[in-house]
Image (tube, helix red, strand yellow):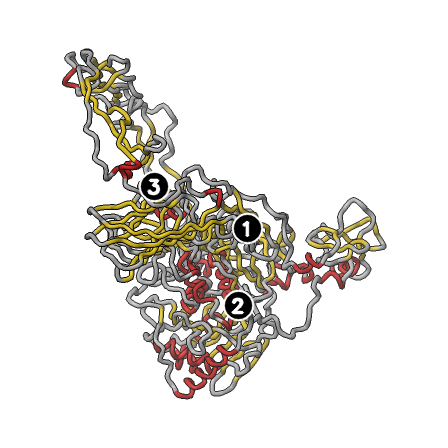
Amino acid sequence: MHVPVHVCVWGGGTLFVCICAPVHDYVCIDQCVILSLPVYTESLQHVLREYGVVKPVNTDSVGRFLSGAVSAPQLDSQHRETLFYNVTVFGQELHLRLHLNSRLVVPGAKVEWHEEGSETTYEPLRDSDCFYVGEVTNVRDTSVAISNCDGLAGMIRTGKEEFFIEPLVRGGGLMVEEEERGDGRRHIVYRSSAIKRPPVNQTGSDRYREDNEGGDGVQARVNQQTRQARARRQANEEHELFNIEVLLGVDSSVVHFHGREHIQKYLLTLMNIVNEIYQDRTLGAHINVVLVRIIMLCPAKSMSLIELGNPSQSLENICRWAFLQQKEDRSDPEYHDHAIFLTRQEFGPSGMQGYAPVTGMCHPVRSCTLNHEDGFSSAFVVAHETGHVLGMEHDGPPGNECGDEVPMGSIMAPLVQAAFHRFHWSRCSQAELSKYLNSYDCLRDDPFDHDWPALPQLPGIHYSMDEQCRFDFGAGYIMCTAYSTYDPCKQLWCSHPDNPFFCKTKKGPPIDGTKCSPGMHCFKGYCIKLTPDILRQDGGWGTWSNFGSCSRTCGGGVRFRTRQDSRCLSPFYEFQLCNLEECSEPFADFREEQCKMWDPYFEYDNTKHHWLPYEHPDRKSIRCQLYCKSKETGDVVAMNRMVHDGTRCSYKDPYSICVRGDCEHVGCDNQIASDTQEDKCGICGGDNSSCKIIKGNFTRSVKKQGFLKILEIPRGARHLLIQEFKGTPHILAVKNQATGHLFLNNEDEFPESRMVIEKGVEWEYHNDDDTETVQTTGPLGYAVLVMIRSHGDSKVTLSYKYILHEKLQSSIESNLVQEDTAYFEWALKKWSQCSKPCGGGKQYTRFGCRRKSDGKMVHRTYCVNIDNLRAISRDCNQKECSQPVWITGDWEECSSSCGKTGYQSRSVRCQQPLSGGGQRSIHSKYCNDDRPEGRRPCNRQLCPAQWRVGPWSQCSVTCGNGSQERQVLCSIPDNSVGLCMETKPITLRTCQLVSCTGDCPCIKST
């Protein structure tokens, strides 16, 4: 009798075949057996484009083989805090260094099974101590999240791509047989990009913004808990560690797919990967994802929550369900901050992988996500949807301006991808998270900071080396003392009193805290004295690296050094100031340079602009983000990036600097976090005793239109304030005397209130009903000229005041600019260049503006109101011009080494000798001789012939032994047939496919 079968490939690893009862006709019952390897690998081709079968091995810290056993039950329980494995992934051997993720599951966490009706069963969350995170030691920029509860399962990320690893078969006698025999256990590895997926319907969005929770009873409880959350803060604002305590809801479709026996391990492995994604340093925050509770739902309850094809209603159902599961007491260890729901039901359009509210974290009925579970790659979906709840938008328009990071694998890409080449959080995700994170008070409490039984700070304090030898090798064994040449903290050797010179080792050190000599203990492989500082460290700090290069060559930058904690993925860093000397280029503005560099690249409203620096006047929290202002339109645009390290946080603070996006306070003594300040005239730590206040009033009748100069303010002036006494139609303008740039209210500018930045100094201009004010805190790096842009003939009356150090007082007794003719005049500066190089030309006088008091040439603007002198001309270069001649350059190399197309070229120019020596290039029509050849053929000999081969044909048979053919021709580059001297490549070879005998294909064991 024919028995139909239904083949299912697990995302968690195991392949089952369900034997269906004939009376039900293709309705599967729970009679399932494990398929053989050949059938399994054949079925994998339906879900994976590419995969490999490997046998990972357990090694020591340097990669030396210890055992083929990789699962936790087969390993020494005393040395499972840190593990090492070698895994060969598509030809590359990866050495994994892993440490136990002890903060993935809270102590005492339970799994709840919500059965049919109202029955609920509870069981402890098993095997929570076999989940690890770490890195690949022989590859840079990596991370690993793996479980070894039953083989190795999880994610390995290198700098270029991600791989998933799973046991070929889970559980059963095969595991015991392979691992205990020492042959190694078979696993599959595959790239995240190899997972076959249905086409994605892009019409929907995974973000949910509706606030309609519905239900009076639910709403009342929501309001109550919201008030409680606002009234009770769990920690102060400066706490840097955030914990998302998760309720994980799992519907029956997921349980059925993975099987009740294996579902716990699979879910913990999945959440271990999610947590690892949130540990990526591009997030810019320290967030742990912690499981406090898992609820498995029966089919009836699962179907009542998921409305097929309706993601918004399904999400509302899930959020309301999660709210009803919440514990009343916020101090309850099972009180959750966020609910993650996994299903395999189609809750949305084809390919929709998740759905979530935006900025719902800590809200009673909005802190929840709906996720389509599809194997380990679903970890990216969960991380993405939880990112929405944390306040992150999709990368790219209309969410934000980080669409450029989507092709590089940003986690908040609009279409959630598992096939990232290098996943990361975009700069926008980091900024959006930073904007909201401090408002999520529920994430501030530590779920591990409860009254759990206290564990010893270092486990070895309670166990001697002799005791550890007995644990490793059995009764009677003690630490080997026969040899004095080895360090017991590097590797523990043990022997039996019956044979003290025969010493054995498990190739590992004693556990940290083991006493190694009086007052000394083993710690990270060294016998040292334990100090409070060492015990306070989370893990073991490595040595500091050398300081890197300075972020700036002058003007004050920063440089970093790092050290690694053996248990943490991200290094700890510190920085110091460097290159504090002023830049030789006058008036350099580092922020201005960063805006200017975008001129040729960045288009705004489909137009290129000249970008000027801009500092937001109100929002101090974004001072280290780059904002620029269009010179043409005045539009302020966020460039969506942080300013470079070493950029001043504010133009009002000349010392504090931006470091990795944060403003670091620096005192005037150039010491980080110093409170030393300048006095009003710029003396660091001064008492204002050297400060002089210069002030006065100015009244003048305007006689002519145009610009009228009224005040000179010297370099070094601070706290400048210029005010009109009453409104006039005239307009105040300010010019940089060093550059001649009229930067405030030039002829084309409308006099509206605004901020202007000129060469590192921020100016404030206010126009209130034609009454104007100009002010700046300075210090001025350049002298300025205050002018009036006159309109009409009304009188101008204003006051001025600024502070100057007594050593910098202006040599000019009065700041007022007198009539131009009394102080300045036009004077001969130089003669112009001759109009002709020979044959008789003309040159003319060039006049400049000269100050009468000292004869020094100044900027031409000082003489703009003085009549210019009439130009004087004179003859020059009267000698006759020489006859032009042809000048040729050297021949270039031939364009080809053989064949019919080789050419070489050289330069040919018509040049005229000059009377003073030298030559000039002129038009070729002036050279009378024939033009020399500029291009000629070369290397026109035949090219040698070479063998060219075509592709192999398909095998002549579909199974067993056959043959393949290919075409081989001797040809030269012009595709004609030639004579080849080398041995002709083969044209025929054998091919071997699977055997034609038997009912199923078989493969050899690796």
**Of the pair 247 and 783, the residue shown nearer to us:** 783
- Residue at position x 43%, y 82% in the image: 301
On the image, the x and y values in percent for residue 149 come to 58, 64
For marks 1 and 3 on the same chain, the one whose residue lies earlier in the sequence: 1
On the image, the x and y values in percent for residue 973 come to 28, 28
**Of the pair 816 and 281, the residue shown nearer to us:** 816
- Residue at position x 48%, y 55% in the image: 663
Q: Secondary structure at mark 3?
A: loop
Q: Is residue 2 visible?
A: no
Q: CA distance from mark 1 to mark 3?
A: 29 Å
Please indicate whether residue 928 sits to the left or right of residue 522 in the image.
left
Quick one: label 1, few (<14), some, or many (20+) residues within 10 Å? Answer: some
Q: Is residue 916 above or below residue 362?
A: above
Which numbered tag is attached to residue 237? 2
Q: Amino acid at mark 3?
A: Gln
Please indicate whether residue 175 sits to the left or right of residue 616 in the image.
right
For marks 3 and 2 on the same chain, the one whose residue lies earlier in the sequence: 2
For marks 1 and 2 on the same chain, the one whose residue lies earlier in the sequence: 2
Q: To which residue does mark 1 refer?
A: 686
Q: Is residue 270 above or below residue 943?
A: below
Q: Secondary structure at mark 1?
A: loop
On the image, the x and y values in percent for residue 135 come to 55, 53
Q: CA distance from mark 3 to mark 2?
A: 48 Å
Q: Amino acid at mark 2?
A: Glu
- Residue at position x 48%, y 77% in the image: 230
Which of the 4 image quarters holds residue 55? bottom right
Q: To which residue does mark 3 refer?
A: 737
Which of the 4 image quarters holds residue 897? top left
**Of the pair 339 and 488, the residue shown nearer to us:** 339
Q: Amino acid at mark 1?
A: Gly
